[in-house]
Image (cartoon, grey):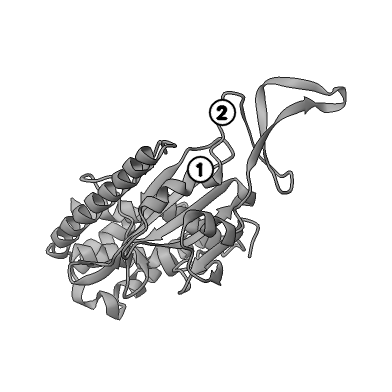
Amino acid sequence: MSANVETMMYVRETPWHGLGTKVQEAPNSAEALKLAGLDWEVKQNDILLGDYGNVIEGFKANVRSTDGAVLGIVSDRYKVVQNAEAFSFTDNLIGGDVRYETAGSLYGGKKVWMLAKLPTETVVGDEVTPYMCFTNAHDGTGSIQVCMTPIRVVCNNTLNLALNQAKRKWSTKHIGNIEGKMHEAQMCLEYGAQYMESLAIEADKLANKHISNDQIQEILNELFPVKETDSDRVKNNVQKMKDEFMICYYMPDIEKFRNTAWGVVNAMSDMVTHTAPIRNTKNYKENNWGRIMAGNALIDSVVASVSR
């Protein structure tokens, strides 16, 4: 496993991103953090200047308690939210068919996450499993973020579309008392339900919109443009991406949506979820996981194109 994904656990089945070590089910956030190797704290230390030992005023170093690794340089007004604090409110989500699926760290512990699997739903005749991802950053780049990542079960494709009607990503205050935790958990469930409802509506609309092969080529030319002055290598790489998209478009799981806008969206989702990049770096899977959490620009662009 590369340095980007430092530690990780997953429950039962190998997750779609293919990372992690299988463990028994984690009953609560504390156990999930322990199994994922995230049961450490962040300390804030003074920053000393070179050989002189002078303290740099106004800044602190966020340092991991277990090994002294520096996770980030932050303002001295920055408030650390420990891993246990950041994810403890998610225990109020767990019950029924909601369970922890994965947890882990990225970039040497600078970013940590926990993923909860929600009950599977039906979207235009397909089984889609919603996942709710909670992330926390210790490098000063972000707060506690929550995002929805639905997975089309038949092909393990991500359907993390940016929708105008509902939020896919939001932040949470994580209030420390019991009532606050329950409120934040309920808010997350409500946002998640709103997103899935809006996704089903959008998918139905796109599944009923005809898209011809000529229109697909126009969309691909728009998404993957080339200029006459581009090198042969650039032109070949662009053509390879277009070819890979068409391979995905003609896969059996998309047959029932062929010649529809929803089929085009799923083909792009298949391509960005499973197709290796032209430059297949050693950190490809880990970087792809980051894009899954943040959303993928190509999926959003193709949705915008077919929606016009």
For mark 2, give the secondary structure.
Answer: loop
Q: Which residue is mark 2?
A: 78
Q: Which residue is at 52% across, 59% downward?
A: 32
Disc 1 target residue: 85
* Furthest residue toward right: 51
Q: Determine if residue 227 is in view.
A: no
Residue 124 against residue 109 in the figure, above or below: below
Image position, residue 171 (x, y; %)? 39, 39
- Classify residue 173 by image quadrant: top left
Compare residues 63 and 216 and report the one nearer the observer.
Answer: 63
Instruction: Report how many numbered discs are placed on residues in the image.
Output: 2
Classify the position of the N terminus by image quarter. Answer: bottom right
Tell me which label, 2 or 1, sits earlier in the chain: 2
Residue shown at 54%/70% (left/top)? 23
Locate residue 181: give its quadrant: top left
- Residue 275 appears in the figure: yes
* Inter-mark Cα distance, 2 to 1: 16 Å
